[in-house]
């Protein structure tokens, strides 16, 4: 079994790794905008990728072969028209529904494809593969007033639910990124449309938190149920389906970072290539189906009870064309997930890898378990604790990188 790593956002800067750098001072932001207008993108520093080569070399020492990395994330550094709050009547409906209008720009900022190519060159030089994840579920989340640079996170559900805006997004941003990656087909394991789309249409989950004053004004609202989803299942299906068609037309494999194995079950038997618009909830997994697992079952709404003996990697049972891979799983430190039931008192990261392999998985990508490096670490280290690094290296037969990297 191949082992991969989720290097989701370098420097812990979610929504800011590729494209314009939103963390520079305003004057520098304006100067860089002027350089873009003059076609002098190469003169703009790219500090957020400066440790990529070192990190990929270290991951390769551990015999990690595939890396998953987020591109637009929540769209924070992707300016367009908006996001602006829509006026909703009656006002009480504003409680569960974070409704923002956003129109994508009619031209892709050249820094996005430029930075993607810089990244792909490093992957080519190190002989590794990448899963570029186009957007995260946070792209539809609650937004705020734009800052002095015209930036705000989330609030971009219109690129999913509005057909004309969806078309602009596909024909500019996605199309331009696919064109840029065309010379690097060997480096692309699969293009991922969206990470964990389930949360975009679920009334509960990470996008559902309400402000304290809202909860106080609405005491009957259960915590975690304080949201009407920004998009519907069918709108999400259309977005994913059209993106998969475009990715396929450019000759790339496709995937979707599904939060639950159940999302693949709900897909039903349907061709992913050249498909027709869905009439109901028919989720599309792409040519390389993917699901995530954190051992959090919940009344049939969450993860399976366990990995072992569940047939989770049997593509013929799912009727999705090929067996799924495990896009995210937690180490035995359980920073995000729970202990694995089938391992009981012997729950180690190494044993988790063995269980996944025995279940028939061909690729499993571990999620970072060390989000904030200590002061002795070099900039942007691989965010895996020592015991996790050692478990992975013991499983793969690789060697450990320097402790401070």
Image: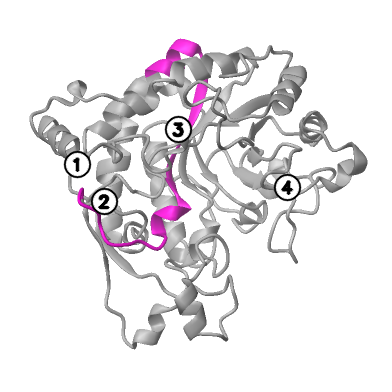
> Mark 1 or mark 3, which has the lower sequence index?
3
Residue bearing the label numbered 4: 317
- Residue 151 numbered mark, or none: 2
Q: Distance of mark 4 from mark 1, alpha carbons? A: 54 Å
Task: Report the residue that reaches farthest toward the front.
Answer: 375
Q: Are marks 2 and 4 in contact (CB under 8 Å)?
A: no
Q: Is residue 221 magenta?
A: no
Write down the region rendered in magenta: 121-149
Helix, strand or loop status at disc 1: helix
- Which numbered circle lies on residue 26? 1
Seen as rendered, the residue at the extreme right is 345
The numbered mark, 2 or 3, whose residue comes first in the sequence reads: 3
What residue is rendered at 57% in x and 74% in y? Answer: 225
Residue 277 makes an appearance in the image: no
Q: Can residue 139 be found in the magenta stretch?
A: yes
Q: Which residue is mark 3?
A: 11
């Amino acid at each position: 079994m191949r082992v991969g790593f989720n290097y989701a956002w370098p420097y812990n800067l979610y929504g800011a790794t590729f494209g314009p750098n939103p963390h520079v001072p305003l004057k520098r932001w304006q100067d860089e905008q002027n350089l873009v207008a003059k076609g002098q993108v190469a003169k703009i520093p790219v500090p957020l990728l400066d440790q990529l080569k070192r990190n990929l070399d270290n991951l390769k020492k551990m015999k990690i072969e595939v890396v998953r990395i987020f591109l637009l994330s929540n769209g924070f550094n992707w300016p367009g028209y908006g996001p602006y709050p829509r006026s909703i009547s009656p006002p009480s409906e504003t409680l569960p529904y974070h409704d923002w209008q956003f129109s994508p720009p009619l031209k892709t900022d050249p820094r996005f494809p430029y930075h993607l190519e810089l990244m792909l060159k490093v992957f080519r030089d190190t002989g590794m593969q990448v899963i570029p994840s186009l957007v995260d579920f946070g792209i539809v989340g609650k937004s705020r007033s734009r800052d002095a640079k015209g930036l705000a996170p989330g609030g971009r559900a219109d690129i999913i639910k509005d057909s004309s805006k969806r078309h602009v997004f596909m024909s500019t941003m996605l199309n331009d990124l696919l064109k840029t990656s065309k010379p690097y087909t060997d480096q692309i394991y699969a293009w991922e449309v969206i990470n964990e789309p389930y949360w975009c249409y679920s009334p509960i989950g990470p996008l559902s938190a309400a402000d304290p004053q809202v909860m106080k004004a609405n005491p009957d609202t259960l915590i975690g149920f304080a949201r009407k989803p920004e998009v519907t299942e069918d709108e999400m299906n259309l977005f994913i389906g059209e993106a998969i068609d475009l990715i396929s037309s450019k000759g790339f494999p496709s995937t979707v970072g599904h939060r639950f194995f159940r999302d693949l079950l709900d897909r039903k038997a349907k061709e992913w290539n050249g498909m027709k618009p869905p009439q109901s909830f028919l989720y599309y997994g792409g040519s390389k189906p993917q699901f995530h697992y954190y051992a959090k079952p919940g009344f049939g709404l969450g993860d399976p009870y366990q990995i072992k003996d569940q047939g989770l990697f049997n593509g013929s049972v799912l009727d999705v064309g090929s067996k799924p891979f495990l896009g995210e799983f937690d180490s035995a430190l359980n920073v995000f997930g729970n202990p694995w039931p089938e391992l009981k008192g012997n729950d180690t990261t190494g044993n988790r890898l063995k269980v996944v392999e025995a279940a028939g998985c061909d690729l499993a990508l571990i999620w970072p378990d060390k989000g904030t490096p200590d002061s002795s670490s070099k900039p942007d280290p691989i965010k895996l604790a020592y015991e996790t690094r050692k478990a992975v290296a013991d499983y793969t037969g690789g060697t450990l990188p320097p402790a401070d990297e």
